[in-house]
Amino acid sequence: MLSNVSPTILVSIRILIIAFIFFIWKKNPKTKSIFDIGYILITTGALGNVVDHCLYGYVIDYIMIHTQTWSFAVFNLADLFISIGTCIIIYDDIILQHRQKGKIDFPQ
């Protein structure tokens, strides 16, 4: 998608995105540890991908989930951190907030 863009520009964009995520995290008044864990995972995952890109010129993917007949995407630990952190924040914002307001009745 962005293969013709300079690596310096790509790293700069990624750093700006990380700074934006950090800004949103710090502006949010929540002081819950699960919310913080989500943002920490996203930030560290993004930084890990930036470090890979700076050191090697690309991100190294090394985890592959597959069977003999089925194969899933190849990814790395940083991608996993970003995905888990995003799921935690979505869970916190949607499920926990609505449960506290009584809008969703999920079993405890």
Image (spheres, grey):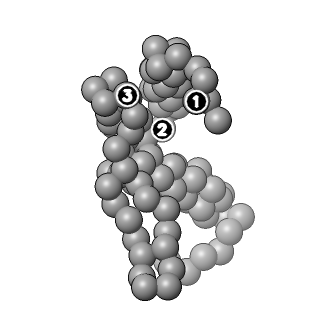
Q: What amino acid type is highlighted by mark number 1?
A: Ser
The residue located at (58%, 20%) in the rendering is 5
Judging from the image, what secondary structure is the residue with disc 1 in? loop
Residue of label 3 = 57
Residue 96 higher or lower than 1, as above or below: below
Residue 27 visible in image: no
Q: Is residue 76 left or right of residue 100?
A: left
User: Looking at the picture, how far across and down is residue 32, in whole percent?
Assistant: 40, 45
Farthest right residue? 103
User: Looking at the picture, how far across and down is residue 28, in whole percent?
Assistant: 52, 31
Q: Nearer the viewer, residue 43 or 27?
A: 43
- Determine the CA span between mark 2 and mark 3: 37 Å
Q: What amino acid type is highlighted by mark number 2?
A: Lys
Looking at marks 2 and 1 on the same chain, the residue that comes earlier in the sequence is marked by 1
> Mark 2, mark 3: which one is toward the viewer?
3
User: Looking at the picture, how far across and down is residue 105, in whole percent?
Assistant: 65, 74
The residue located at (64%, 35%) in the rendering is 1
Residue of label 2 = 30
Residue 33: mark in rendering: none
Residue 1 visible in image: yes
Residue 52 higher or lower than 34, as above or below: above
The residue located at (60%, 76%) in the rendering is 106
- For label 2, the crowd category at 10 Å Cα-Cα, with few meaning under 14, some 14 to 19 and many 20 or more, is few
